[in-house]
Every structure is written in structure tokens, then in C-alpha cells.
Image (tube, rainbow, N blue to C red):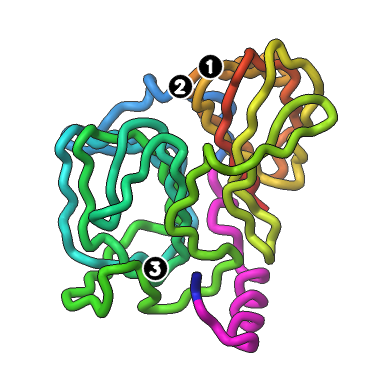
């Protein structure tokens, strides 16, 4: 976790709270099937949505078996967030991130000393700004560490094994598991899970931006739109309010609430 003095944290939090949200200007994407998103020739990522003002992007990554990263330590100017869907990848040379693994890095954190995937890996990534690489040729540690502190309301989460975390069960039966939350803005990343033949009304407040990716199963909104496995949506702040009203057994959805 980033170590900041109380004063520097409060100053950073105030600046962050008044800053423009990184994902605010992305267009409405009512429904998108991953299979319909073309993969750029020779690249391992597909762009799901991008904020034209900030460059903040949500991406789907597909690493082949025996993939090896550049092996040069670096940091980004903006936050980086990853949720592994399947396969496995090591991002520090030792600890393997598998299905359900999650990480959140504020900007300015050195990483990338050794990255590889023996079985291949599929995962969702989010960058809080236009991707940049600030290389560190002589890192002072083989662990992730802060090179340039960046104000961020979320802590540095090196590896959260989400299957080991408890579910919160709502009165209507759906379950919530928070992966990370911004203590300044209230923005959060979370998993939703639904029991067998769930029906109800889970509102998506139009005062917040909502984004999701169906990890498995199927769910439907009150306008009749159905989201099957590996489908995606982005509803920016101010988009017409909708509610999740139906879900198949065991449906698992990766969600982001953007303040």
C-alpha cells in the first residue's frame, strides 16, 4: 500500500475528488459481444471502450501459452486494474494469478520485473489514462514499490484472490463481493452473483456510471436486453436508468460503478 503522510494524503485526496473522473466521457455501449470485437492483427488485446478525453480504457487481453513479457521494470502515470478470467499469469516471477485473481495499482508503482504465462491467460484490464511506459532500468526492489506517488482513493492491491473473499447477500438473494473501492469518490469494482432463476429489480442509478462484463451465465435488463457469457456494456453517468431483473443460475458479473 502507498505510504503517505496524513497531510499529503488529504491534499492528494482533495485534488483527486475535484478532478474529472477518468472514465466519464466514454460513450454509451448498450450491448457488446466480445466475439464481435475484432482483435488487431498481431496484438493480444481488444478495446471494449475508451474515454476520448482522458484515454482511460477497458481492454480484454488474451495471452497465448508460453507468453513472456518484456522483463523491464516500469510504471504507468495512471491506475491499472486487472481481473483474470481464465488461465494463469505471473506478474512478479513467483505469484501466479489465476481465474478470479484481481489487482489494483495506482499510478507510479514500479512493476513488470518479470511477467510470463505458461498456460496462457484471458483477463480484463482497465487503465485510468492513456497507456504509457516509464522504464526503470535499475529498480531498487524486485517487489512492486512506489516510484512516483499519485493521488488515488484506492489502495495498492497486489493480489486479491476473489474466490477466497466472502459474499454479501442482499435481501432479494443476489450476492455482492467488493474487489476495491475508492474511499474518496465511492467508485468501486465488484462481482455480482445470482442464484438459480433469480428475478427481482436491481437498479442501476443513472447518477453513477455503470460498466460490466458477464464472466459466466446470463442476465437481462428491464428493457429486454439480454447479456450472455462474455458480453459487455458501458452506461455513462446520465444514461437512462435501468434495472437488472432476471439472471440464470450462477451468473457471475464483473461490475464497475464509476462515480
Q: Please state if 48 lies on the left or on the right of 12 as rendered.
A: left
Q: Which residue is mark 2?
A: 33
Q: Which mark is residue 228?
A: 1
Q: At numbered mark 2, what does the secondary structure look like: helix, strand or loop?
A: strand
- Which badge, 3 or 2, comes first in the chain's sequence? 2
Element type at marker 3? loop
Q: Which residue is mark 3?
A: 77
Q: Earlier in the sequence, mark 2 or mark 1?
A: 2
Q: Are marks 2 and 1 in contact (CB under 8 Å)?
A: yes
Residue with the most extreme front position: 164
Q: Residues within 10 Å of mark 3 (few under 14, many from 20)?
A: many
Whole-percent x, y for residue 184 in the image? 68, 66
Mark 3 or mark 1, earlier in chain: 3
Which residue is pictured at 23% across the width and 52% down the height?
A: 115
Q: Nearer the viewer, residue 29 or 210?
A: 210
Helix, strand or loop status at disc 1:
loop
Where does the magenta region start and end?
3-26
- Can you name the residue that lies furthest to the top here? 197
Quadrant for residue 131, please give it.
bottom left
Mark 1 crowd level (few <14, some 14–19, many ≥20, 10 Å Cα): some
Q: Residue furthest right?
A: 171
Q: Find out whether residue 116 is within the magenta segment.
A: no
Question: In this image, 249 relative to 99: left or right?
Answer: right
For the point 80% across and 20% down, the residue is 200
Q: Gap between marks 3 and 1, in whole Å? A: 34 Å
Question: Can you tell which quarter of the image residue 43 is in?
Answer: top left
The one nearer the camera, 16 or 238, is 16
Residue at x-position 63% and y-position 60%: 182
Horizontal side of 100 relative to 21 (left or right) equals left
Q: Position of residue 253 (x, y in %)?
A: 58, 30
Amino acid at each position: 500500500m502507498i505510504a503517505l503522510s496524513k497531510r499529503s494524503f488529504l491534499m492528494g485526496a482533495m485534488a483527486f475528488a475535484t478532478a474529472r473522473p477518468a472514465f466519464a466521457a466514454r460513450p454509451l455501449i448498450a450491448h457488446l459481444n466480445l466475439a464481435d470485437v475484432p482483435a488487431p492483427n498481431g496484438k493480444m488485446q481488444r478495446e471494449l471502450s475508451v474515454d476520448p478525453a482522458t484515454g482511460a480504457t477497458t481492454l480484454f487481453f488474451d495471452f497465448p501459452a508460453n507468453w513472456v513479457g518484456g522483463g523491464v521494470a516500469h510504471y504507468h502515470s495512471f491506475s491499472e486494474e486487472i481481473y483474470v478470467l481464465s488461465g494463469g499469469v505471473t506478474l512478479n516471477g513467483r505469484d501466479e494469478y489465476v481465474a478470479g485473481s484481481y489487482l489494483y495499482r495506482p499510478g507510479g508503482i514500479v512493476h513488470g520485473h518479470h511477467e510470463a504465462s505458461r498456460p496462457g491467460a484471458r483477463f480484463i484490464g482497465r487503465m485510468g489514462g492513456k497507456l504509457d511506459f516509464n522504464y526503470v532500468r535499475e529498480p531498487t526492489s524486485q517487489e512492486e514499490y512506489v516510484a512516483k506517488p499519485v493521488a488515488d482513493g484506492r489502495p495498492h492491491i497486489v493480489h486479491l484472490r476473489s474466490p477466497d473473499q466472502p459474499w454479501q447477500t442482499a435481501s432479494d438473494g443476489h450476492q455482492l463481493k467488493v474487489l476495491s473501492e475508492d474511499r474518496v469518490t465511492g467508485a468501486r469494482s465488484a462481482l455480482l452473483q445470482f442464484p438459480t432463476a433469480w428475478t427481482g429489480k436491481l437498479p442501476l442509478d443513472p447518477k453513477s456510471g455503470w460498466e460490466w462484463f458477464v464472466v459466466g451465465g446470463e442476465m437481462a435488463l428491464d428493457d429486454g436486453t439480454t447479456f450472455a457469457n462474455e458480453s459487455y456494456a458501458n452506461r455513462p453517468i446520465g444514461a437512462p436508468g435501468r434495472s437488472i431483473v432476471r439472471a440464470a443460475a450462477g451468473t457471475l458479473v464483473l461490475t464497475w460503478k464509476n462515480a
